[in-house]
Image (tube, grey):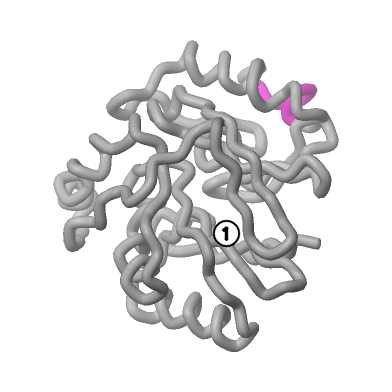
Amino acid sequence: MITIKTFIFNPFQENTYLLYDETGEAVIIDPGCYSKSEEEQLSNFISSNNLKLKHLLNTHSHIDHILGNRFISKTYNLPVQSHREDEFLIARAQEQAVLFGMQIDAPPAVGKYIDESNTIKFGKSVLKITHAPGHSPGSLVFYNEDERFMIVGDVLFNQSIGRTDLPGGNLDTLLKSIFTKLFPLGDDMKVYPGHGTTTTIGQERISNPFF
């Protein structure tokens, strides 16, 4: 059984997800910890629950979702795993940060490219991957069919969708991703977005104003 712990980090109020099962093995998705106190909050939870972090995953590479990559990669000796098509965003991360009045060190390079051909294994658990571009070219969704949940980054929100006015974004592509990649996974799929509250595919199918 997978436990999902949500942390809300950084000025963008980004959802960082820590997933772990009964073995104590864990994955972190989109570490957004920005301040020292946020780093300590995350690392203290990992240590106090005796978790062993096995994977560092990014749904996409906008700065609010990768601010903690350097800390996690260095602290737990893990490579960053994300889609190749978002690599250009990592190269621009420091430039993006300045636009928001922030200063950051250069984030670590991607250590392993992942896509739909990969699965993420930790403990007794497995996450599948679907590529859902539109918010960014390399947006990924991590999901578990048995336990009926998906971590979607900024592809889909409760009553909204990801913005498409950023570099590499495209509204038609995003809507196609949602209709062809997410909706077929089932109305009972619980959706954990990159910002805001959880929802379900069924709820969004019938009430999201974009559909």
Q: Residue at x 60, y 43 (%)?
A: 119
Residue 195 position in % (x across, y down):
54, 48
Q: Position of residue 209 (x, y in %)?
A: 66, 21
Residue that carries the numbered disc 1 in the rendered image: 17
Please state which amino acid type lies under the numbered disc 1: Tyr
Secondary structure beneath label 1: strand
User: Residue sitting at 35 percent across and 60 percent down?
Assistant: 69
The quarter of the rendered structure image containing the N terminus is bottom right
* Highlighted magenta segment, given as a residue range: 204-209
What secondary structure predominates along the stretch shown in magenta? helix
Q: Residue furthest bottom?
A: 48
Image quarter of residue 144: top right
Q: Residues within 10 Å of mark 1 (few under 14, many from 20)?
A: many
- Residue 74 shown left or right of residue 146 in the figure: left
Question: Vertical placement of 126 versus 27: above or below?
Answer: above
Residue 10 visible here: no
Q: Quadrant of residue 123?
A: bottom right
Mark count: 1
Residue 20 covered by magenta stretch? no
